[in-house]
C-alpha cells in the first residue's frame, strides 16, 4: 500500500524559529511590536495598501472591514454564495444582510453581470472573493460600485501575491482581508491581515484594531492620553505570531513560485483527461495573475463527485470538495437571501474536487494523483 497523500501540509520556510527566538528574547510579546510592523511594511510594499494591519485571522479582518464600511442593521451586502462563511458572518454580525448572487463558470467568482439586478435601496457594499487566488472581474465591479455609490470589500483570504491586470489583489476595494491560516499559501497557524486602501480610513482602522482605543496614536506620541474613542475589538496577533509570519512573508515569492510550478504540473498532466471528456480543468482568464493556491477539477456529473472522493481516498489520495453554497446553508437561509438564480453555484460546487497541493507534494505524487483520477473517472 502506497503512503497516503494528504490534501494539505503547512508550509515551513526555515527561518520561523530564529525569528520567534528573537521575539522571545526581547521581552515584548503582545501585539504591534517590531515584528508586527515589519510584516505590515512588507504587506504595504507588496500590495500598495495605504495601511496593512495584522489580525488573528481573515475572519477578523473581514469583521473590521464591515465596521469600517459602516454596515448597519438592515444594510445589504452583495456577495457570492460560493465562499467561506466568514465573508457573510462579518456582515451579519453588524446586523446586515448578505445578498447572494451567482458565480462565473470559469473562475467561480462573483458573476459581475448579476450584481446590478441585486442592488436595492438598502445595498451598501459589494464583497468580492478571489477564489483560488484568481481575481474577480475588478474593472467591471469597481465601475458598478462607483456608479451606485457602493463600497467594495475584498475577501482576498486566498489571494496574496495574485493580481488582476498586473495590480495586486487586495488593492482594489476600500479594504481587503488576507488569511495566514495553515491551509493558505503563507501561514502563521492562525493569522491574517486587513489591507486598508482608503487612506482616510487608516486611522479609524487602527482604533478598531486596538479595542476601540487610540493606543497606536498614543504610542507614536500623537495624542496625550490613551483612551476609549470608538467601537473595536482585539484583532491584533501577538509578536510570536508576527515573528513566525515575517519568515513566511520574506520567503513569499519563492513559496508562490513553487506552488505555481506544482499547479502547472497538474494542469499539464490532466490535459489528456480533459481532452477525453472525463473532467474539466480550471480556466484562468488572461488578465488574472494567480498564485497557485488551489488546483481543482470539475467532474462531468454532480452524482459522480462523492463516490469519486471515496474511491480516491481508498487509493490513498486525500482529495476534497469545497464550499457548501451559503445560500442553501442553515445560517445562510436564516440571515441572507439569494438574488436571482444560483444555477452555476449549485452545479459547479457539486462537481468540484480539490487535489492535494502543498510544499511537500512531489512530482511523483502528483503523477500518482492523476493516475488515481484516471482510475476513478475512467481513462476515456
Ligand atoms: C480561509 C478563508 C477565510 C477565513 O480565513 P481565516 O484566516 O481562517 O479566518 C475567509 N474567506 C475565504 C475565501 C477563505 O478562503
Image (cartoon, helix red, strand yellow):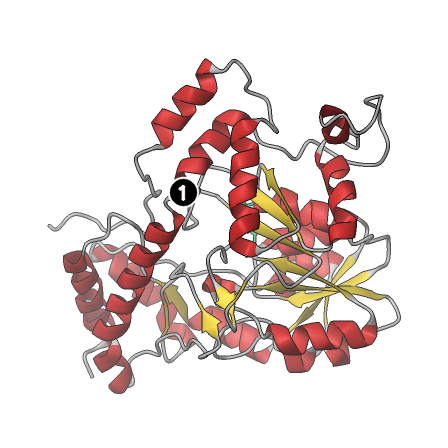
In this rendering, position of residue 283 left or right of residue 356? right
Name the quadrant containing residue 281.
bottom left
Please name the residue shown 51% across and 30% down the image: 35
In the orientation shown, which residue stands out farthest toward the front?
Answer: 221
| Residue at mark 1: C-beta within 8 A of ligand 1 | no
Whether residue 341 is visible to the viewer of this picture, yes or no, is no
How many residues crowd around disc 1 within 10 Å: few (fewer than 14), some, or many (20 or more)?
Answer: some
Relative to 73, say whether 242 is above or below: above
Per the image, the residue denoted by label 1 is 250
Residue pictured at 35% horizontal, 26% vertical = 17
Placement of 158 over or under 285, stated as above or below: above
- Residue 344's spot in the image, x, y percent? 55, 78
Decide if residue 6 is in sight here.
yes
Rendered residue at 39%/20% (across/down)? 21
Pick whichever, 294 or 278, lies toward us: 294
Which residue of the protein is positioned furthest toward the right in this rendering?
121
Residue reaching furthest to the left? 1
Residue 318 placement (x, y as % from top left): 29, 54
In the visual, does 369 lie left or right of 186?
A: left
**In the foreground, 222 or 258:** 222
For this view, does 153 lie left or right of residue 45?
Answer: right
Where's residue 62, x and y in %?
A: 66, 49
Q: Who is closer to the viewer here, 296 or 220?
A: 220
Count of numbered circles in the view: 1
Q: Quadrant of residue 224?
A: top right
Local secondary structure at mark 1: helix
Amino acid at each position: 500500500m502506497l503512503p497516503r497523500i494528504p490534501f494539505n501540509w503547512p508550509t515551513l520556510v526555515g527561518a520561523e524559529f530564529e525569528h520567534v527566538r528573537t521575539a522571545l528574547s526581547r521581552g515584548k510579546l503582545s501585539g504591534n511590536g517590531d515584528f508586527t510592523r515589519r510584516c505590515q511594511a512588507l504587506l504595504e510594499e507588496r500590495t500598495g495598501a495605504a495601511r496593512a494591519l495584522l489580525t488573528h485571522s481573515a475572519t477578523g479582518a473581514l469583521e473590521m472591514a464591515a465596521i469600517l464600511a459602516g454596515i448597519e442593521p438592515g444594510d445589504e451586502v452583495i456577495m457570492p454564495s460560493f465562499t467561506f462563511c466568514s465573508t457573510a458572518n462579518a456582515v451579519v454580525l453588524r446586523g446586515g444582510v448578505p445578498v447572494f448572487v451567482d458565480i462565473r463558470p470559469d473562475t467561480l467568482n462573483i458573476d459581475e453581470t448579476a450584481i446590478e439586478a441585486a442592488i436595492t435601496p438598502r445595498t451598501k457594499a459589494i464583497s468580492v472573493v478571489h477564489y483560488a487566488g484568481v481575481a474577480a472581474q475588478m474593472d467591471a465591479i469597481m465601475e458598478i460600485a462607483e456608479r451606485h455609490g457602493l463600497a467594495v470589500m475584498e475577501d482576498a483570504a486566498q489571494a496574496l501575491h495574485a493580481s488582476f491586470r498586473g495590480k495586486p489583489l487586495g488593492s482594489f476595494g476600500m479594504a481587503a482581508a488576507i488569511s495566514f491560516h495553515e491551509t493558505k499559501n503563507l501561514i502563521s497557524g492562525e493569522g491574517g491581515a486587513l489591507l486598508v486602501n482608503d487612506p482616510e480610513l487608516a486611522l479609524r482602522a487602527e482604533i478598531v484594531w486596538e479595542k476601540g482605543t487610540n493606543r497606536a496614536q498614543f504610542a507614536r506620541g500623537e495624542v496625550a492620553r490613551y483612551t476609549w474613542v470608538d467601537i473595536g475589538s482585539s484583532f491584533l496577533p501577538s509578536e510570536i505570531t508576527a515573528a513566525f509570519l515575517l519568515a513566511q512573508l520574506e520567503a513569499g515569492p519563492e513559496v508562490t513560485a513553487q506552488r505555481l510550478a506544482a499547479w502547472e504540473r497538474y494542469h499539464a498532466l490532466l490535459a489528456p483527461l480533459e481532452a477525453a471528456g472525463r473532467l474539466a480543468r480550471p480556466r484562468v482568464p488572461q488578465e488574472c495573475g494567480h498564485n497557485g493556491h488551489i488546483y481543482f477539477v470539475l467532474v462531468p456529473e454532480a452524482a459522480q463527485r462523492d463516490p469519486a472522493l471515496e474511491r480516491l481516498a481508498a487509493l490513498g489520495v486525500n482529495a476534497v470538495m469545497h464550499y457548501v453554497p451559503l445560500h442553501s446553508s442553515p445560517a445562510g437561509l436564516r440571515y441572507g437571501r439569494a438574488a436571482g438564480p444560483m444555477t452555476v453555484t449549485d452545479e459547479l460546487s457539486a462537481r468540484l474536487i480539490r487535489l492535494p497541493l502543498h510544499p511537500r507534494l512531489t512530482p511523483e505524487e502528483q503523477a500518482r494523483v492523476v493516475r488515481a483520477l484516471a482510475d476513478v473517472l475512467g481513462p476515456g
